[in-house]
Amino acid sequence: MTAPVFKKLELVGTSNKSLSDAIANAVARAKQMEPNLRWFEVVEQRGAVIDGEIQYQVTISLGVKLE
């Protein structure tokens, strides 16, 4: 059996609620795009103020197992 190989993607998730919600949004979207999603890593956390409201933003790196 050969060792698995992964491709790496990077996404930015956003939320008006929290950083953890921004992560969950990004991972949920990634799972729709990539059924072989295996792991994620938070690369960057930041925020923005848009029309007086806080928007939480996270950059995540994702590992997708190749068939």
Image (cartoon, rainbow, N blue to C red):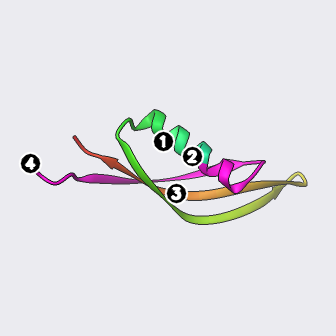
Q: Are marks 2 and 3 in contact (CB under 8 Å)?
A: yes
| Structural distance between the alpha carbons of marks 1 and 2 | 6 Å
| Structural distance between the alpha carbons of marks 4 and 2 | 32 Å
Q: Residues within 10 Å of mark 4 (few under 14, many from 20)?
A: few
Q: Which residue is mark 4?
A: 1
Q: How many marks?
A: 4
If you read the primary sequence from the N terminus, does the residue marked by circle 4 or circle 1 appear first? 4
Q: Which residue is mark 3?
A: 60
Question: Residue, x 40% and y 38% (percent of image)?
Answer: 34
Q: Amino acid at mark 1?
A: Ala
If you read the primary sequence from the N terminus, does the residue marked by circle 4 or circle 2 appear first? 4
Q: Amino acid at mark 2?
A: Ala
**SS at circle 4:** loop
Q: Which residue is mark 1?
A: 30
- Residue 67: numbered disc: none
Q: Residues within 10 Å of mark 1 (few under 14, many from 20)?
A: many
Tell me if 39 is positioned left or right of 4 in this view: right
When the figure is inspected, residue 6 is found, relative to residue 25, above or below; the finding is: below
| Structural distance between the alpha carbons of marks 4 and 1 | 27 Å
Q: Are marks 1 and 3 in contact (CB under 8 Å)?
A: yes
Magenta residues span 1-23
Disc 4 versus disc 1: nearer the observer: 4
Q: Residues within 10 Å of mark 3 (few under 14, many from 20)?
A: many
